[in-house]
Image: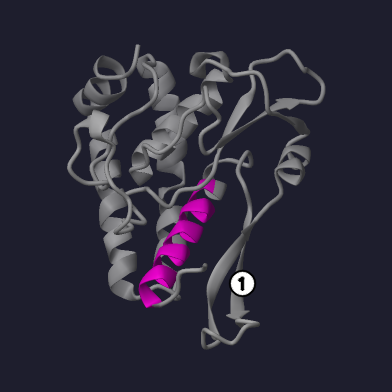
Amino acid sequence: GCDKGPIFERLVLKEYLVYKIYNLLTDMSFRVSLLYVNYQDTREKIKSYSQYGFLIEDVDDMAKRNKCFEVDKPAFNTEKTDRQQTTLVSIFQYMIGNTDWAVPNYHNIKLMRPVTDSFSFPYVVPYDFDFCGIVDAKYATPQEELGTSSVKERVYRGFGRNMAELQSTLDIFREKRAEIEKLVMGFELLDLRYREEIMDYLDEFYKDIGNKNFVEEVFIRNARA
């Protein structure tokens, strides 16, 4: 059944916010609509209740909006996808503290190609962010093989890039920083302390990417090869 209560509702609102942050970075993202849903048990075993939820844009609509079509087979090696977009996706997942995604088995990602070029390297579009550090759900456990002790610990799951590629992608994040902050701090459905927690977590990311040695260490030297 549907989980309910203020803690669950808070997780839903945080995940909704993650989608909205990603919308600011690229149009190749799923749009979301917030709803206030009334739940009623037709067997009358559970008292009816209301809470926030959100709808995610249909994959075909998202693809069409980007003049693309969905690709759902065969399996693609991560590095056989559009390089620039995949760099953005990988750094975004790092920013929000999400390791729960993978390209080859289509895990929490969709792929799409331009309608004009069905042989190109496909674009990666991520979704399902409830295991990320920003949401910080009690049920989200860190993946054993990553050796982390908390989902809030960031791990870069992308492949290595050169400094020029990294900096041009990181510039997108820098350019949107003020908008991201405005979005998060203006999202009054979340208590102020949770908005501030999210901003602290994001500020940490921004501080780190301002350090060239850090960028080299995380996104080049310790990246997947």
Asked whether 30 or 105 is in front, the reply is 105
The residue located at (60%, 81%) in the rendering is 41
Tag 1: amino acid: Leu
Check the image and report above or below for 175 versus 165.
below
Does residue 148 appear in the picture of this structure? yes
Residue lying at the far right of the rendered structure: 116
Position of residue 88 measured from the top left corner of the image (x, y, whole percent):
48, 31
Check the image and report above or below for 148 versus 83.
below
Taking the image as shown, residue 106 lies to the left or right of residue 152, namely right
Magenta residues, start to end: 6-22
Position of residue 77 measured from the top left corner of the image (x, y, whole percent):
52, 15
Classify the position of the C terminus by image quarter.
top left
| Magenta segment includes 16 | yes
The residue that disc 1 covers is: 35
Which element is circle 1 on? Answer: strand
> Please, what is the dominant secondary structure of the magenta stretch?
helix
Asked whether 38 or 174 is in front, the reply is 38
Position of residue 3 measured from the top left corner of the image (x, y, whole percent):
45, 69
Does residue 210 appear in the picture of this structure? no
Position of residue 103 measured from the top left corner of the image (x, y, whole percent):
51, 26
Q: Find residue 142 and report its image quarter.
A: top left
The residue located at (65%, 18%) in the rendering is 74
